[in-house]
Image (cartoon, helix red, strand yellow):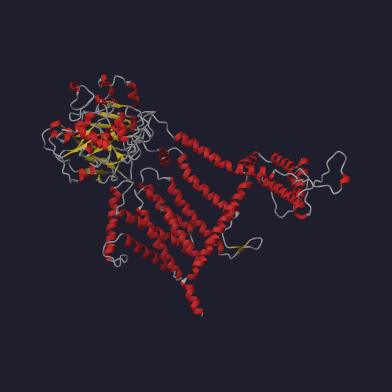
Amino acid sequence: MIAHRNLGLVAAAATLLAAAPLSAIFERWTWLVQAVIAVAAVAACAALARLGRTPLWAQVLAMLGGLTLALTWLFPSGAELLAILPTPSTFGHFAELLTGSVEDMRSYGVKVPDTDPLLFVTVLGIGAVAVLVDVLCVGLRRPALAGLPMLAIYSVPVAVYVDSVPPVPFAIGAAGFLWLLVTDNVDRVRRFGRRFTGDGRDVDVWEASPLAAAGRRLAVVGLALAVLVPLAVPGMTVGLMNTLNSGVGSGLGGPGLGNSPGRVDLFAALSGELNQSRVTDLVKVTTTEKEPFYLRFGVADDLRANGFRVRGPNGQRATGDLPEPAERPRPGVERTRHQATVEVSRELNMPLLPFYAEPANFDDLGSNWFYDPNLQVLFSNRDDSRGKKFSFEYVRSTYTPQALRSAQPLPADLPLRRQQTVTPDVPEVRALVAELTRGERTEYDKVRAIYDYFSEDNGFTYQLSTEEGTSGQQILDFLENKAGYCQQYAAALAWMVRDAGIPARVAFGFTNGSRRSGETLTLTNRNLHAWTEVYFDQIGWVPFDATPSYGVPGSTRSAWAPDTDAPEETTPQDGTSDTPDETDPTAAPDRDPNQFEEGLDAGAGTGSDTPAGRTSPWPWLTVAGLLALLALLAVPALRRLALRRRRGRLAPVARTVDPPDADSATAGQPSVVVSTDPDRARADAHAAWDELIDTLVDYRVRVDPTETPRATADRLSRDSVGTDAAAGTAVRLLGRAEERARYARDPLTGEPLPAALRTVRGALAGQADRRTRLMATVLPPSVLGRWRTTIADTSARLVAAGGQLRYRLLRFNPRRLIANRASR
């Protein structure tokens, strides 16, 4: 029964470890705390049921009862008895949570927030797996089959996670499964009876054995291959490498664009190194609109101290007609309806699809895609954008400055205003905004005052590299250096507009590019872009692009947000040209146009988070990691070298004493008597013999601990050193020294034992093959074997201490107390 309880606890712990991959799909760790409570309740009920020697079906019922009590306590309906006893209303509440979980699965993309329906179905699933694992391991004694329900947990993030699941949680779950198998194996061995060592010592703990050691090696190697091979094979996964290669960017905000020319990732850090090695076609769009605005796919509206972040979208299926955009019968607002077709290349892989703002309907999209009308994003948590082709209708809205100027301020208690005007406390930015908007009466005039500030007349330029600031605030560094790329301009404008009390956010997408054939635009990684959207009452989100137009191929300007760097008479009313070559050449006389043609706004498609003016730390981290790995591999060799050097310091010890008879002194010479310390000589002989045994182990020569030193020396001189007479003599000398040190009263003294060791080692090295010599030098088996024995002994002591502690605790077992009282 003790073994059963131990195996049941290990089964519960292994279930929790197997749930580690779920951390990839949840934003927080609430699910883990609740899962621990549920699994603990299952394990406790199972242990109590086995304590009463109940049959297996009763144990299953007890575990299900414990899971029900835990779920009742964690997800109450308000009608429970004593907070943990369920009622019919409780089970009705559970049914509602299950129904709500289906809707949440369809609505939220990873990582998902902590909603009660999703947490309930997660805890319920983990608790059910804990019941199955316990039944298979303890009840049916089939622990290998327990891997199936544990694997079912891992299949959940694999099915819903857009990117590859990180390998570390998988390794944690695999380690739990191996722990379960080892525990069951130890329990099975103990069932054969008590074990004794060769010297008669009782063994009640785990001991190393060749078969068990081989199994552990195979398990470790298999686990390492399962984790490392997908990282090394191109195309299988990039999750871990992206994690290691991403850092805190120097741009304003967190949601960056891309980690390779063919991938756009809103959830990576903002790019800082704006270098492109190649141009990749990502999207082809055909539209009936002659001068369309930017093709958008994402938005960031959660502003924190280190920049903007992306919130999880939530919406309805993007099949059929969408709710018609609200009509705006306002003077100066023009709305036109257009048709567009988007074709995404296989190089663009993200859980979002690009489209023009204010869509009316989508065609040719499956049921896995959803549309969030608030964020205006098209997303999926089960599919990606690779190779997608779809059509849609959209409404293009244009505004006159007078129409925007007539918009009234939003009410202070409006949720949109409260959420979209929150800014970190940066007094310098707030003072600058107050200075720029002083005297402006309307919302639009305030926005234009901030927008016009980002002009070349005020010193702002578009640059591929930015200088590192000293203020400690990224937005202050940008406003001081006045040089950056699109993400910095968009985030800074949105931040300052929010400081003025007006809702604003950052949008991501593509410019119109410079490659157009009829009604078809071909957009590449060079056309990735970010801009600002500002909300006006009864009008909606209106785009403003503060990035200098000469730095954005395919830049589009409008009457309400003109190009601040262009001459007033050439300000376009509806949009600028699609190529940088058609912009005013005087806008940036000190810049090389070819430079921007190669890397304009390239930061939207790069994968590095290091500013271009700063050296990437990744090569140094790689070198440091390799050096650390080499140092770790060199530890056994250094240990063996130190041990050999210490044993090689062998020399007879002499001391000078007074001669017993003065007449015995030779004329002209001092009279001394040289005597050898027998204890030192015996220790030297033992050290030399130990070195010989380690040398034999290193060179894969059989060592028989039952042989006498003389027998071992004769066998080595006959079989191992071959015809080398000097080596045969040396090994016999070592054997004779050890024999005398063990059995004789006076040990052997005055013999060159270090020289004999060198001779024998040279002969053994000459007889061994190249691989054996390499392993004896780099990874000496004698050192590794000694370490394995130490680890096994330490583990045995820990297990023995745990057994003794468990035995002491079980002295208070109710069954034992009752039996003792009955015996009285």
Q: Nearer the viewer, residue 762 or 334?
A: 762
Estimate the x, y position of residue 111 in percent, counting from the top left: 33, 46
Q: Is residue 289 above or below residue 304?
A: above
Estimate the x, y position of residue 804 in percent, counting from the top left: 53, 64
Q: Residue furthest front?
A: 662
From the viewer's perspective, tell me whether residue 372 is left or right of residue 38: left
From the viewer's perspective, tell me whether residue 660 is left or right of residue 283: right
Q: Quadrant of residue 767?
A: top right
Q: Is residue 718 visible?
A: no
From the viewer's perspective, tell me whether residue 733 is left or right of residue 610: right
Query: How many numbered marks does the figure carry?
Result: 0
Q: Quadrant of residue 311?
A: top left
Estimate the x, y position of residue 775 in percent, counting from the top left: 62, 42
Estimate the x, y position of residue 364 in percent, counting from the top left: 27, 40
Q: Nearer the viewer, residue 264 or 506?
A: 506
Q: Nearer the viewer, residue 362 or 229?
A: 229
Q: Is residue 24 above or below residue 400?
A: below
Q: Nearer the viewer, residue 475 or 677?
A: 677
Q: Is residue 335 visible?
A: yes
Q: Quadrant of residue 579?
A: top left
Image point 42% across, 62% down: which residue?
43
Image point 38% across, 54% down: which residue?
32
